[in-house]
C-alpha cells in the first residue's frame, strides 16, 4: 500500500500536482460564463470561497493566457477571447453549423423570430449557433449556453427521435428538475409527450424552460434517422402562442430536413402536392369545423346519430353532432388511431400501448388486449369491426420502419390473431357488401390490397393488389365501401377522395379544399353522406393560409348509400 503524499504547491492530498489549481481555474470560467456582463473581484471571491491570494494568482494566470479579460475602467472580469477561438475550432470540425447557416437565416426571415441550433451534450442541449432579431428573447441561453433536455423544445425534439434503447437509458438517468410550473417532471408523462413529438415531427416548449418564453423545434437527422442536432424558433409567448407554434412546426421540420440532406424521410411525406386547379364541387361542405392535428378513423354510430373520430396526436376521441356542427373532445392518455363504439357501451380504442376500452363518462381507459407487447416502438393505427363485431386493426412502427406493422383480428373475449405481417404503414379497412372481399391499405407502399374473406371463420387469404396510387395523386389513407361495392379512399396530400369500382378502376375523384384528407365513412339518416376527416399536421403557415379548413370534417352529398357500421361485440 502506498501512502498519500503531502500536497504540492497547494494541491489537496491525493491530487496530481496542479489539478486543484486547474479545477479552480475552470470554476472561475464557469462562474464568469454563467453571469451576464462582468464581475468584480469581491463578487468572485464570495461565489467561489477562495482565499484572496489564491484568487489573485489564478486570475493573473487566466488573464495572461487569454481565458479571462479584465476591464481596466472598472476593474471587473469577464471571459476572454481565447475561449471563443477554441470554440470556433471545435465547431469548425463539424459540418452542422455550416450546413445549418442558410436555413437559420431563411427561418429567421420567414418567422421574424430568433432561431437556435443545438446539439446533445452531456445530457443537456448545448446551443452552438443562433440568429437574433430585434426584440429577441433575452435569456441566458445564447451560443455556448445549455438547456435541460426535458424542458426545452430542442431537447425534446432530439430525445423523441433517439433510438428506443438510448432514449430509455437517457430518460432513466435524467434529473427532471422543475424550471417553471409548466415543466414536465413526471417520467411517464414525458414519455407520452415524446411519443407525440415523434408522431408530429416537431416539439414545443410552452413556458417550460422560462416563464413567458415559447419555442418550437425539429431534429436534424443523419442517414440512420438519428438526431445529430436540432433547430428551433424561440420568442415571447405572446408572439408565439400555441396555434402559431403548430403552424411553424412544418417550417422547422423543413429546415431540419434541408440541413440533414433530407435524411430519415417518413412514409407520410412532408411535401404537399399542388392544389388542383378546378373548383371544389357544390356538394362538398364543412360538416364540423375543427383544427385537429390528425383527424382519423371516422365511425358513424347509427344508434346515437353521432360521428365518432379521433385526433391521433391530440390525443383525443371526438364525438360530433353533424346537425349542429359541434363536437365534444374527450382527451385520452395515449396516441390513439381509432375509436369504435362497443355493444356494451363506451368505446374500444386502438392505441400505442394496446387495445383499450374507454369510458367517456369517467375518461378511464383499461387495457383489453396487447397483441404487440413483443414489438416495442410500434403503435396501432386504423381499425374497424366486421359484421360479426370482431375488431380488425393494423399497426406500424412509430418511426415508420418498413415491414414492422401487422394486421390483427381482436375477438370479443380479448384474444387476438395475427392475420398478416410485414406491413409498412397499416391504414384503411373495409368489406364488400357480400362479405367476400376484405380491403386493406398499406400507405407506405401506396397500395390498397384485396383479400378473400370468410366471414364465418373470420379469416383472409389470397392477398392481391386492388389499386396502386401514384405519388402525384397523394398517398392512400383511410377507406370505406358503399352499398354498391365501390371503394372510397381518402388521399393524403392528394386534396381528394377517390371512388374505385370493384375491379380497382377509378370511377370518380372528388376534390376537397384541403390537402390532407385522412379517412371517410358514410353517415346521416339514410347513410348517403360521406364524412371525411382531415389533418393540419406539418402544414406550414403559408399552406394553412391556403387551406384554412384543414383539420375539419367535410360532408360530401353523394346520393349513394353506404353500409352501416358495426359496433364491437365485446
Image: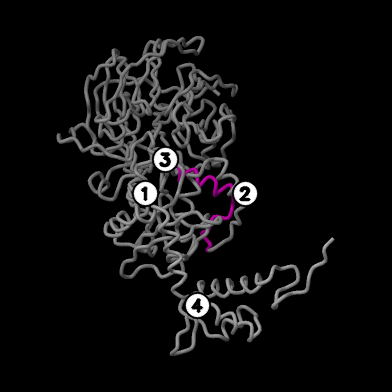
Residue 548: x and y in percent read: 26, 46
Q: CA distance from mark 2 to mark 3?
A: 27 Å
Is label 3 in a helix, a strand or a loop?
loop
Q: Quadrant of residue 141?
A: bottom left
Q: Magenta: predominant secondary structure element?
A: helix
On the rendered image, what quadrant is the N terminus found in? bottom right
Residue at left 83%, top 66%?
3
Is tag 2's residue or tag 4's residue first in the polypeptide sequence?
Answer: 4
The Cα–Cα distance between marks 3 and 1, rounded to whole angstroms, is: 13 Å
How far apart are labels 2 and 4 at the CA level? 38 Å
How far is disc 1 from disc 4 in space, using C-alphas? 36 Å
Hey, which quadrant is residue 234 in on the image? bottom left
Considering depth in this image, is 556 or 411 the residue closer to the camera? 411
C-beta proximity under 8 Å, tags 3 and 1: no
Magenta segment range? 180-199
User: Secondary structure beneath disc 2?
Assistant: helix
The x, y position of residue 508, in whole percent, is: 21, 22
Disc 3 packing (10 Å; few <14; some 14–19; many ≥20): few
Tell me the colour scheme of the image.
one colour
Q: Viewed as shown, does residue 186 lie left or right of 146?
A: right
**Residue at the right extreme of this rendering:** 1
Q: Which residue is mark 1?
A: 256
Q: Examine the rendered structure and indicate whether residue 216 appears above or below residue 375.
A: below
Sequence-first disc among 2 and 3: 2
Q: Is residue 115 above or below residue 424?
A: below
Give the labeled residue for mark 3.
223
Element type at marker 4?
A: strand
**Quadrant into which the C terminus falls:** top right
Q: Which residue is mark 2?
A: 172
Q: Which of label 3 and label 4 is nearer to you?
A: 4
Q: Earlier in the sequence, mark 1 or mark 4?
A: 4
Amino acid at each position: 500500500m502506498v501512502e498519500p503524499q503531502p500536497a504540492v504547491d497547494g494541491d489537496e492530498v491525493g491530487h496530481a500536482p496542479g489539478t486543484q489549481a486547474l479545477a479552480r481555474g475552470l470554476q472561475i470560467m464557469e462562474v464568469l460564463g454563467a453571469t451576464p456582463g462582468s464581475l468584480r473581484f469581491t463578487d468572485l471571491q464570495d461565489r467561489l470561497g477562495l482565499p484572496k491570494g489564491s484568487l489573485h494568482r489564478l486570475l493573473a494566470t487566466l488573464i495572461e493566457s487569454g481565458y479571462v479579460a479584465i476591464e481596466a475602467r472598472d476593474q471587473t472580469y469577464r471571459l476572454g477571447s481565447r475561449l471563443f477561438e477554441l470554440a470556433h475550432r471545435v465547431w469548425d470540425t463539424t459540418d452542422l453549423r455550416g450546413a445549418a447557416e442558410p436555413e437559420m437565416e431563411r427561418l429567421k426571415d420567414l418567422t421574424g423570430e430568433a432561431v437556435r441550433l443545438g446539439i446533445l451534450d452531456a445530457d443537456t442541449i448545448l446551443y452552438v449557433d443562433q440568429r437574433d432579431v430585434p426584440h429577441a428573447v433575452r435569456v441566458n441561453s445564447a451560443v455556448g449556453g445549455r438547456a435541460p433536455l426535458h424542458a426545452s423544445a430542442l431537447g425534446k425534439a432530439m430525445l423523441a427521435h433517439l433510438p428506443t434503447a438510448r432514449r430509455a437509458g437517457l430518460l432513466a438517468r435524467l434529473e427532471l428538475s422543475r424550471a417553471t410550473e409548466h415543466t414536465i417532471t413526471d417520467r411517464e408523462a414525458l414519455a407520452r409527450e415524446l411519443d407525440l413529438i415523434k408522431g408530429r415531427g416537431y416539439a414545443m416548449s410552452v413556458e417550460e424552460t422560462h416563464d413567458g418564453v415559447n419555442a418550437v423545434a425539429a431534429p436534424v437527422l443523419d442517414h440512420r434517422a438519428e438526431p445529430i442536432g436540432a433547430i428551433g424558433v424561440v420568442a415571447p409567448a405572446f408572439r408565439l402562442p400555441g396555434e402559431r407554434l403548430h403552424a411553424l412546426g412544418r417550417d422547422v421540420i423543413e429546415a431540419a430536413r434541408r440541413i440533414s440532406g433530407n435524411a430519415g424521410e417518413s412514409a407520410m411525406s412532408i411535401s404537399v402536392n399542388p392544389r388542383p386547379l378546378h373548383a371544389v364541387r357544390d356538394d362538398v361542405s364543412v360538416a364540423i369545423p375543427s383544427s385537429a392535428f390528425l383527424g382519423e378513423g371516422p365511425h358513424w354510430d347509427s344508434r346515437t346519430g353521432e360521428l365518432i373520430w379521433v385526433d391521433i396526436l391530440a390525443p383525443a376521441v371526438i364525438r360530433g353532432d353533424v346537425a349542429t356542427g359541434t363536437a365534444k373532445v374527450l382527451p385520452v392518455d395515449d396516441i390513439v388511431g381509432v375509436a369504435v363504439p362497443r355493444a356494451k357501451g363506451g368505446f374500444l380504442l386502438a392505441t400505442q400501448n394496446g387495445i383499450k376500452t374507454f369510458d367517456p363518462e369517467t375518461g378511464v381507459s383499461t387495457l383489453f388486449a396487447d397483441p404487440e407487447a413483443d414489438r416495442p416502438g410500434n403503435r396501432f393505427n386504423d381499425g374497424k369491426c366486421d359484421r360479426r363485431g370482431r375488431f380488425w386493426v393494423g399497426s406500424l412502427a412509430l418511426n415508420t420502419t418498413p415491414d414492422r406493422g401487422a394486421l390483427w383480428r381482436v375477438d370479443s373475449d380479448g384474444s387476438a390473431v395475427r392475420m398478416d405481417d410485414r406491413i409498412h404503414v397499416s391504414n384503411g379497412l373495409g368489406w364488400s357488401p357480400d362479405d367476400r372481399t376484405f380491403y386493406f391499405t398499406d400507405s407506405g407502399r401506396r397500395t390498397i390490397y384485396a383479400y378473400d374473406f370468410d366471414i364465418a371463420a373470420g379469416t383472409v387469404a389470397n392477398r392481391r393488389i386492388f389499386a396502386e396510387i401514384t405519388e402525384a395523386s397523394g398517398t392512400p389513407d383511410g377507406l370505406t365501401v358503399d352499398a354498391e361495392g365501390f371503394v372510397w379512399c381518402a388521399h393524403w396530400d392528394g386534396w381528394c377522395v377517390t371512388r374505385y369500382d370493384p375491379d380497382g378502376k377509378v370511377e370518380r375523384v372528388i376534390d376537397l379544399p384541403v390537402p390532407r384528407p385522412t379517412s371517410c365513412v358514410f353517415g346521416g339518416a339514410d347513410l348517403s353522406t360521406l364524412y371525411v376527416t382531415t389533418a393540419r399536421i406539418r402544414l406550414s403557415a403559408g399552406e394553412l393560409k391556403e387551406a384554412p379548413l384543414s383539420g375539419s370534417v367535410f360532408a360530401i352529398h353523394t346520393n349513394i348509400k353506404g353500409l352501416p357500421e358495426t359496433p364491437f361485440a365485446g
